[in-house]
Image (cartoon, rainbow, N blue to C red):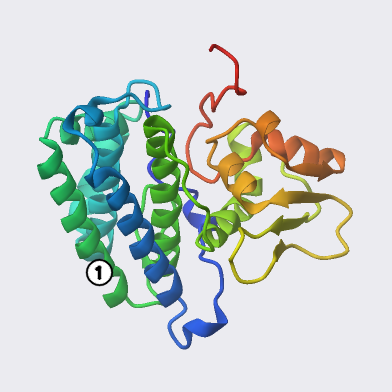
Amino acid sequence: MSGPAAPAPDPAAAGPAPDPASGSDPGAAVRADLTEEGRELEVLVAGIPGADWARPTPAPGWSVAHQIAHLAWTDRAALLALTDPAAFAGEVGKALADPDGFVDAGAAEGALLPPAALLDRWRTGRLALDAALAAASPADRFPWYGPPMKAASMAGARLMETWAHGQDLADALGVRREPTARLRHVARIGVRTRDYAHQVNGLPAPREEFRVELTAPTGAPAGLWTFGPPEAAQRVTGPALDFCLLVTRRAHRADLALRAEGPDAERWLDLAQAFAGPPGPGRAPRGEGR
């Protein structure tokens, strides 16, 4: 597979960050953040010249158009999971029939569209998915390419992937994106998928919980985002942006200001991933191969 390793994070662990201001609807905050994440990414690509849609991105074999096509394709899959489980089961069947190629095939099909048509497909799909997420019962679980998950978790997963592929696009276009408080959702998925990352690498999960302390982006509420018990002996600390880049495998650990205390925490930073499926090769350290 030449693109990213999977269409979504581990569903069993992909919950949104809690937000006390969200009232009786725990998914409202993450849905709003998902909408804004997509809007900002659309602004980034909408004004680029047509030739730049063919520009290669860090995912081998994937252009800018492939990245947007993949997001549109996965948003459609999420919409089917929420609104038409039988049709979604058909998509799962296609994935099982071609586990090594179905993600690439979906991206390649969409990448053939003219940029304006592709952008419109993605925008229309995002709006439909936003509406379906808002209409979904918060207590229900919906099918996915792994264990079923609630609508709020689906929104968090879509935000994580939109942000991660947006990083691929920003890197390809030479643009620096300002990190936002929306990274809290990505960080939480990264923490919750700790044991899954060990599993896909054929390793036993650590027995102890870790303490994770991340410095929030400038301007984000709460200067420190914390996960896990304060008394935990093994810890991970550093900038939230760096942690999110690590768990989405958009940067090599050697290029990030993350610190691990304890042998298990140290090993985790070499394995961490917030998405399901094989880990893939990840990014090389800066300077390698250049």
**Helix, strand or loop for disc 1:** helix
Q: Residue furthest top?
A: 289
Residue 17 image point, x, y percent: 55, 67
Question: Position of 154 compared to 275: left or right?
Answer: left
Circle 1: residue type? Ala
Badge 1: how crowded within 10 Å, few (<14), some, or many (20+)? some
Q: Which residue is mark 1?
A: 132
**Residue 208 x, y percent position in the rendering:** 81, 53
Snapshot quadrant of residue 4: top left
Instruction: Say left or right for 212 vs 166.
Output: right
Q: Is residue 183 above or below residue 46?
A: below
180 or 275: nearer the viewer: 180
Residue 64 appears anywhere in the view: yes
Hey, which quadrant is residue 59 in on the image?
top left
Above or below: residue 122 compared with residue 290: below
Residue at 65% x, 48% y is 194
